[in-house]
Amino acid sequence: MAMHPIDTRHLRHVLVLAKHRSFRKAADALFITQPALTKSIKNLEEQLGVNLFDRKSQSVDPTPHCEVLLEHAERVMHELEEIRHSLDAISDNLRGELRVGTGPIVSRGPISDAVARLVSKHPELSIRVDIDNWAGLLKQVRSGSLHLMVADIGGVEEQDDLHIHHLAPMRSIAACRPGHPLLNKGYVEA
């Protein structure tokens, strides 16, 4: 029996449902109705001939079949996104979504300025900025959920699986109100 091609919408629905473990929350995240999501998952399960989720009263849990599918689905969706970016780069007209991660301090100055310049230069480009700690950002870059990160990761050196470009160091200051007891210390150690 020949297998029909898997619709990428179904893969996206499986990924989001596995993340949220709830049809209602996943449907909200996908901006579709819960019955539409249920039908999409059921159609894919029928097409594959396996149950992808164990449906319980309080949660929806991926089955072992689903875990295998999730591994491949993440890679497929990432590759499709890379194809879109490569094609956009050829036309030299940036469009689509750029997902950038940054730390809380960097997000206020350099990132917001760069985002404003990029958007004015490329109006068809939408930029999503996620704020997290550097360990969380590294994980998201490696998984493909972020395209890049800009963060102060002082102790982290070159990573074999990442291309790291060192930016100019940020100037930092410590400030306190006049008369604060720390002013009498002369030197404060963290």
Image: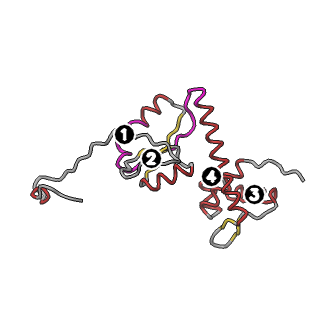
Q: Residue at x 48, y 48 (%)?
A: 159
Query: Is residue 95 positioned above or below 163 on the image?
Result: above
Report if residue 103 lies within the magenta region: yes
Q: Secondary structure at mark 4?
A: helix
Say whether marks 4 and 2 touch (CB < 8 Å).
Answer: no
Residue 158's disc is 2
Instruction: State which tag comes first along the sequence, 3 or 2.
Output: 3
Side (left or right) of 98 relative to 133: right
Q: Residue at x 15, y 56 (%)?
A: 187
Instruction: State which tag comes first along the sequence, 3 or 4.
Output: 4
**Amino acid type indicated by mark 1:** Pro
Disc 1 marks which residue? 110
**Amino acid type indicated by mark 2:** Glu
Residue 167 position, x and y percent, is 38, 39
Residue 93, quarter of picture: top right
Residue 30's disc is 4
Query: Which circle, 1 or 2, is nearer the viewer?
Result: 2
Residue 164, quarter of picture: top left
Q: What residue range appears in magenta?
A: 89-114
Disc 3 marks which residue? 39
**Quadrant assignment for the C terminus:** bottom left
Number of marks in the image?
4
Towards the viewer: 80 or 7: 80
Say whether marks 3 and 2 touch (CB < 8 Å).
Answer: no
The residues bearing labels 1 and 2 have C-alpha atoms spaced at a distance of 22 Å
Residue 141 position, x and y percent, is 52, 49
Residue 14's disc is none
Instruction: State which tag comes first along the sequence, 1 or 2.
Output: 1
The residues bearing labels 3 and 4 have C-alpha atoms spaced at a distance of 14 Å
Say whether marks 1 and 3 touch (CB < 8 Å).
Answer: no
